[in-house]
Every structure is written in structure tokens, then in C-alpha cells.
Image (tube, grey):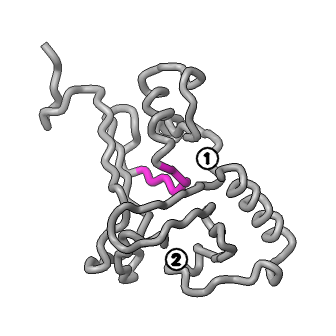
Amino acid sequence: MEKLDKEGIRENTLILFVGDNGTSNKVVSIQNSVQVRGDKGQTTDAGTHVPFIANWKGTIHHGEVNSNLIDFTDFLPTLLQVANISIDRVETDGVGFYSQLIGKISKPRDWVFCHYAPNWGKFKNRRYVHDKKWKLYENGEFYDISKDKAEQYSLNIEDQSLAVQERVKEFKAILKEYQ
């Protein structure tokens, strides 16, 4: 007979809750005391950043917050790690985050690539790479998303520091690799 906890959940069960996209532009949320309108269907932070909640009693520390980048491609290698199945047997672009779930130190994902090709609404296809600060679209639009989450002010790459220009070169190489 399986053992259930007081909430009726099987012991040692990993529960993952995650959204599929941002919220509708009809929805206004509060984030850090600031009103944010949803942007579902768009490639802005409000259109792609979603909540992700993980619960695994006795394994994941209650109330811990992880601000590292996580992409949907990361779920397959992570779940394989949870099931103790070798990731080497599966070809994936994902980066496992199992160590982060259980509070161990691991190298977080450095960037996320996205090929957005919606088959609904009147949205345009877009390809981009971003990290926690910078976002480069294939068409050359470049944003400091740490300060401009709504992507209102495209930056001139040539006006940026050499370090930022190097990061842009890395992003361009990633975009080329995923053509």
C-alpha cells in the first residue's frame, strides 16, 4: 500500500507547476510593487517569463527562490536526472537543473535561445538569444532587458562597451549555430 502524506500526496513525489507563456495583455500583475501588463504572444519578458514552482517534500527546501535561467528544453534532462537515467543516451539542447532543485551548487544556464513561430494569432516569427541582462534578436534589435523588460528602447551595439560587444558576438554565433 502506498504511503500518503497529510495532504494526500504520495511521499517522495516531485511536483512541477509551470506556465506555457506569459499572461494575456488583459491581465495586470504586480511584480516587486510594479504593475506589469501581460504580453502573451509576444517575445518580451511579459510574454515569455512564467512562474515555475517545484515541490518535493524532504528534498527541495521550502521557500527557496532560484533566479537562474531555465528553459523548457531543460525539463527533459532534469527529469532524466531525477529518474537516475543517463542523459548521455538522449540528444537534447536542454541543461539539467536537478542540482539546483535540491540546493546543490551547479553551473547555471548562461543563455537561452528561442525560435518563436506561433501558429495562432497575428504574431510574427522571431529568433533571439538572451541572458539575464541582454537580449539580441536575429534582426539586430538589442536590449538591456534588466532595465527595459518591455523592450521599448533598442540599443546601438556599437555604442556599448567592448565587453558587451563581445557578448553580442557570442549571441550572434549562437543564432548562426541554430539556423
Q: Does 67 appear in magenta?
A: yes
Residue count near mark 1 (Cα–Cα under 10 Å), binned few <14, some 14–19, many ≥20: some
Residue at image location 65% in from the left, 72% down from the top: 139
Residue count near mark 2 (Cα–Cα under 10 Å), binned few <14, some 14–19, many ≥20: some
Mark 1: amino acid: Pro
In the image: residue 21, left or right of residue 158: left
Residue at image location 36% in from the left, 44% down from the top: 54
Q: Main secondary structure of the magenta part?
A: loop
Q: SS class of the residue under badge 2?
A: loop
Identify residue for label 1.
108
Q: Position of residue 50 (x, y in %)?
A: 39, 60
Q: SS class of the residue under badge 1?
A: loop
Q: Position of residue 95 (x, y in %)?
A: 57, 40
Q: Which mark is residue 149?
A: 2
Which residue is nearer to you in this view: 74 or 119? Answer: 119
Q: Is residue 88 above or below residue 52?
A: above
Residue at image location 72% in from the left, 60% down from the top: 171
Q: Does 156 appear in magenta?
A: no
Q: Mark 1 or mark 2: which is in front?
A: 2
Which residues make up the magenta segment?
64-71
Task: Find residue 39 and report its image quarter.
Answer: bottom left
Q: Position of residue 14 (x, y in %)?
A: 32, 34
Which residue is nearer to you in this view: 147 or 128? Answer: 128
Q: Position of residue 40 (x, y in %)?
A: 36, 70
Mark 2: amino acid: Lys
Q: Is residue 134 in view from this perspective?
A: no
Residue at image location 54% in from the left, 37% down from the top: 96
Task: Find residue 55 and report its image quarter.
Answer: top left
In the image: residue 65, left or right of residue 24: right
Could you tell which of marks 1 and 2 lies nearer the N-terminus?
1
Q: Which mark is residue 139?
A: none
Q: How many marks?
A: 2
